[in-house]
Amino acid sequence: MRLIAILLVALLGIPSLGGCDRQKADAPQAPKTEAQNAKGLDRSHKDEAAPAVKFKNPDGGDFDLTKFKGGPVLVNLWASWCAPCIKELPTLQELEQSHNEDGSLGVIAVSQDMAPQGSVEAFLAERDLGRFAAFHDADMKLTDALGIQVMPTTILYGSDGKEIWRYVGDLDWTGEEAKKLLAEVR
């Protein structure tokens, strides 16, 4: 009987291993567009203004993307349960540190974990990413406002606060593909 219970628990957990698609149990899922299904560059939201949705800054205070108006910003939405998110975080941190020196691009990663902000900070510290600021959106308001279905998703906003492109899925943010994309910063 115990073996049957263990097998049942294991089988029920298998669907959760398929990826980092965000699912919302309380709302029916709209059909995904081709752009939402594909990993890679998505320009279908070009020129849309950054939403004025509030989330938490590393100090626990309210923050929103409009604070970056006047300078370009790369916004990464990630979660601790998402393996591709974790894989790309070190490259985002390296990108952020290189641009901190010259101030040419703001880089923030916003956790979409429902756990308290302290657990996000601990998660980053455990992976030697503690220097990366722990922005946090436990209510996933930013994800909802942006229509994000797959994590990680990274969005580049220009100095005017409007979207240039979004990249769905993980990317080496220190690699050649990222350098070509980031050349579009305005």
Image: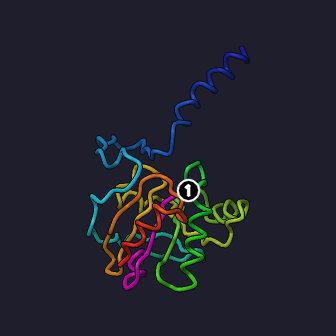
Q: Position of residue 14 (x, y in %)?
A: 57, 30
Residue at position x 60%, y 54% from top? Answer: 87
Tell me the kind of residue under disc 1.
Asp
Q: Position of residue 153 (x, y in %)?
A: 44, 57
- Residue 168, by quadrant, is bottom left
Q: If the image is split into quadrants, where does the N terminus sit?
A: top right
Determine whether, in the image, residue 128 is placed left or right of residue 169: right
Q: Residues within 10 Å of mark 1 (few under 14, many from 20)?
A: some
Q: Position of residue 141 (x, y in %)?
A: 42, 61
Q: Position of residue 5 (x, y in %)?
A: 67, 20
| Residue 77 included in the magenta stretch of the image | yes
Residue at position x 50%, y 45% from top? Answer: 20
| Front residue of this view, candidates 113 and 175 | 175
Residue position for label 1: 113
Residue at position x 34%, y 64% from top? Answer: 165
- Residue 4, by quadrant, is top right
Range of residues picked out in magenta: 65-79
SS under mark 1: loop
